[in-house]
Every structure is written in C-alpha cells, then in structure tokens.
Image (tube, rainbow, N blue to C red):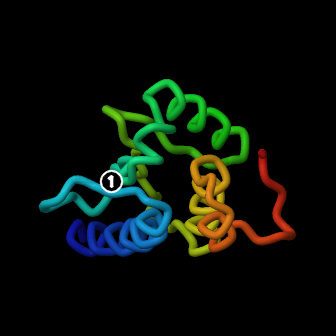
Amino acid sequence: DIEQVQATLAAVNEKVLEGARQMGFTTTPGPRAGHILGLRPGTPELKEKLTPEEMIRIGKRLEGRGIFISVRCGAFRISPYLHTTDEEIQQLLVGLADECCDDDDTRAKFVSSNQPTTR
C-alpha cells in the first residue's frame, strides 16, 4: 500500500540524510514526502563551493559513476527507488563526499582507501 511505500522510501532517505549531514548538508525543515529528499549546502564552506553551476557539474560527474541525482533550486534532489540497497546508499554517500568534501577527515568517513575517487 502507498503508506508502506512512503515509509520504506522515508527510511532510505533518512539514511542518506544522516550521512549527508556529516558532510555539512542540510534539508528544509518541516514535513517531507518520504520519496524525495533535497540536500542543500549547510556549512559556509559548502555554500561557497557549491554554486548552482558547480552542483550541475557534480551531478553530471556522479552520473558518470552510475549515481543519478538531479539539481533543483540549489539542492541535490535524491529520489530513491523502492528497492534501493544499503550498498547503493553508500555509493551515493561516497560520491557526494568525494565530490563535495575538501576535508580529508570528513571524506575518509565515506571514501575508503580501496575505492577510486575522481579527485
């Protein structure tokens, strides 16, 4: 049923948001639909780095890595599928950390030494 679908997708997006917050992203407060998540730059460093143009370029680079997100109104829009796996969530978080985090300690939480990066 639709409520179960929303609950399942909300749980996926909550895992994404938990990791994204560690990178300095935020989301608009208030009620959200479970099937969509907008990640906005939350720290001064991310706000400076992630111009709308840069966010579009990052989205295209992530697409080249098999990670499909979109950019809408200054946010990365995440819309997982119903059967999104933990591995796919981790792939998204690694991609975002690789592309958006300049701080090695923050990146290291997501990017392991045996995974290739685009830097």
- Across and down, in percent, residue 14 comes to 36, 71
Residue sitting at x 56%, y 37%: 59
Q: Is residue 27 left or right of residue 82?
A: left
* Front residue of this view, candidates 80 and 18: 18
Q: Quadrant of residue 34?
A: bottom left
Q: State whether residue 119 is above or below residue 113.
A: above
The outermost residue toward the left is 30
Question: Disc 1 designates what residue?
Answer: 36
SS at mark 1 in the image: loop
* Front residue of this view, candidates 4 and 23: 23
- Across and down, in percent, residue 30 comes to 13, 60
Q: Is residue 24 left or right of residue 28?
A: right
* Front residue of this view, candidates 106 and 99: 106
The outermost residue toward the top is 53
Q: Quadrant of residue 17?
A: bottom left
Q: Looking at numbered disc 1 in the image, what kind of residue is underneath it?
A: Ile
Q: Quadrant of residue 114?
A: bottom right
Tell me if mark 1 has few (under 14), some (14-19) or many (20+) residues whose alpha carbon lies within 10 angstroms of its own.
some
- Across and down, in percent, residue 106 comes to 59, 67
Q: State whether residue 48 is above or below residue 86.
A: above
- Across and down, in percent, residue 22 comes to 47, 69
Q: Quick one: quadrant of the N terminus?
A: bottom left
* Front residue of this view, candidates 117 and 71: 117
How many labels, in total?
A: 1
Residue sitting at x 40%, y 45%: 77
Residue sitting at x 57%, y 49%: 100
Q: Is residue 1 left or right of residue 15?
A: left
